[in-house]
Image (spheres, coloured by chain):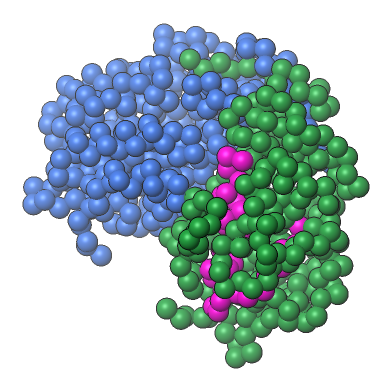
Chain colours: A blue, B green
């Protein structure tokens, strides 16, 4: 029935025998997810990273950055929907202005554009190659780039946020890669202080929060840092399942800046319904997010609860 | 930082270059989870299957049956706790007598023994080699075999259940491998009819329910079959995350036989607290299960909700 097999890692990027394997001795030692490849569609070195696209046998097209799986057409919706709708449905008032840091594949942007009350969504992506590759090889993921409310800036997101006027955004989404290499600055206190400043009172941030099964210490540190930076605000942690990320899950760190009257967002309870697909829209209906999974995503297995709970700050906004 | 690499599948079981890879063109085509191996500890053909144990670099000892990952010491608790405590904490009255079909590694048995009101727990495992190997190489997983309330029978679980007296058990746990090969009978209607008969009124069954991301059709069929067999009862579906199972998750099919007065178990709401570790016990505290994750485990992402919900039968036991 099932064959178990030898895996030979030769440490380079050729696709001998047709499998792509994701190895990171720093981030997920001793384990590797592999996808069967039919064809290499793209392979180039950008100014910042190694960008590859493969056609897989069973996961559609696959985007790889510096050897790490960023997205497959089959399961990208899980991460993209959750990183966008958790903050946008939790925030107490309707969000008008949203900033995405990173997220050059366009998936989080596509999800933000589902919210009709969003008037303006800006993206600061450092690597111009990523949006171009995504538009060409993963067109449904890149659909958000066509939205007239979207502005894409190819620039350093850290510098962009630092230069923002105070109180500009209702929501900042940090859609980064792992905290080793170029994205490591997006896990530093200095960056979170800039984000805090760039948010309106009552505004929220949602950042890619790694995996509870792998990165407990990093998650604890990031939450503790948010607690320190988001003075008077709330801090929480949620997760989703997604087969092609290491260990099959990824989490989200959420924090809110307090309103002038001291109210803070209760992330665990959505303030509004899931966005409806607009009449005539070419977007498919939501496939992962719904209001029930919003709340359930904050409920953690016991080992993870013990890691995370000491670092949380509950919200105080008890509106129905 | 991260190296992407070639994976070469030679289709045999030697561990060249030190990685074990789990491939199944039938059950999870185009994807493979791999673990880095330090040593092969055991390798034998039993009467029923190929049994292997490896020492991994980062997941402790690994038990493999017919090329499929059954358990690692690092993450086995997730599956074992959930397959035992979901049914045992959901059932309305305190369960006294429990049957495990399969589960020869002993992990589900260990979890059942945490419940102090359980008076007797029997196991019907077809392959005597599995408990022996588990005791030797994964002693903590096999801890339940030492409990004086446990009886292990090396026999065909299907025949055993068929021959059971009607109304014998409060809970039946079907801890099977995948529904191809020897375990396929454990997914058939005839087997579920025997389980229904073997349960007391108000009794519950919990079976390994595969992965929502991979086996939607199989899950839908199994639930529909339970709906047909458990006449007047309730049917539900939950899941847990576990890194070393395909796609990082596994699910559970739960069904209840109605009480004489027509009451049925509401699986989504636990009827009692998580079992406490007994004074002086050598069991570690629970690492996955808690009362909040019990309820959250039934809340499904939208794509999965659409597959599962048409086949569910809600419970009517509204006791607090």
User: Would you say residue A297 is visible in this rendering?
Assistant: no
Locate the C terminus of chain B and report the quarter of the image it occupies: bottom left
Name the residue nearer the viewer: B89 or A295. B89
Q: Is residue A134 magenta?
A: no
Q: Is residue B154 above or below residue A161?
A: below
Q: Position of residue B178 (x, y in %)?
A: 75, 50
Q: Is residue B209 above or below residue A128?
A: below
**Residue occupying the far front of the picture:** B280
In the displayed structure, does residue A291 sit left or right of residue B281? left
> Image point 71% across, 17% down: which residue?
B17
Q: Position of residue B242 (x, y in %)?
A: 57, 44
Q: Position of residue B168 (x, y in %)?
A: 73, 79
Which region shows up in magenta?
B73-102
User: Would you say residue A40 is visible in this rendering?
Assistant: yes
Q: Is residue B30 above or below residue A258?
A: above
> Image point 19% across, 29% down: which residue?
A193
């Amino acid at each position: 029935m099932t064959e178990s097999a030898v895996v030979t890692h030769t440490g380079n990027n050729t696709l001998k025998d047709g499998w792509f394997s994701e190895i990171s001795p720093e981030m997920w030692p001793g384990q590797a997810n592999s996808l069967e490849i039919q064809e290499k569609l793209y392979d180039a070195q950008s100014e910042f990273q190694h960008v590859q696209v493969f056609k897989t046998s069973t996961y559609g097209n696959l985007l790889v950055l510096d050897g790490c799986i960023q997205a497959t057409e089959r399961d990208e919706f899980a991460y993209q929907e959750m990183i966008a709708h958790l903050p946008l449905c939790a925030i107490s008032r309707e969000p008008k202005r949203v900033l995405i840091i990173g997220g050059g594949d366009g998936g989080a942007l596509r999800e933000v554009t589902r919210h009709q009350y969003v008037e303006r969504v800006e993206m600061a992506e450092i690597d111009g190659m990523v949006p171009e590759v995504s538009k060409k090889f993963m067109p449904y993921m890149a659909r958000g780039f066509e939205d007239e409310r979207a502005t894409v800036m190819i620039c350093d997101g850290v510098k962009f946020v630092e230069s923002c006027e105070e109180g500009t955004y209702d929501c900042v989404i940090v859609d980064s890669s792992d905290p080793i290499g170029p994205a490591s600055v997006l896990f530093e206190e200095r960056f979170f202080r800039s984000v805090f400043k760039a948010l309106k009172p009552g505004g929220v941030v949602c950042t890619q929060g790694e995996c509870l099964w792998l990165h407990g210490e990093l998650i604890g540190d990031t939450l503790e840092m948010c607690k320190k930076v988001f003075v008077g605000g709330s801090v929480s942690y949620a997760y989703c399942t997604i087969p092609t990320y290491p260990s099959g899950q990824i989490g989200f760190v959420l924090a809110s800046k307090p309103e002038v009257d001291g109210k803070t967002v209760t992330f665990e309870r959505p303030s509004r319904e899931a966005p409806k697909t607009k009449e005539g829209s070419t977007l498919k209906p939501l496939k992962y997010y719904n209001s029930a999974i919003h709340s359930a995503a904050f409920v953690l297995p016991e080992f993870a609860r013990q890691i995370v709970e000491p670092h949380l700050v509950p919200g105080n906004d008890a509106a129905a």
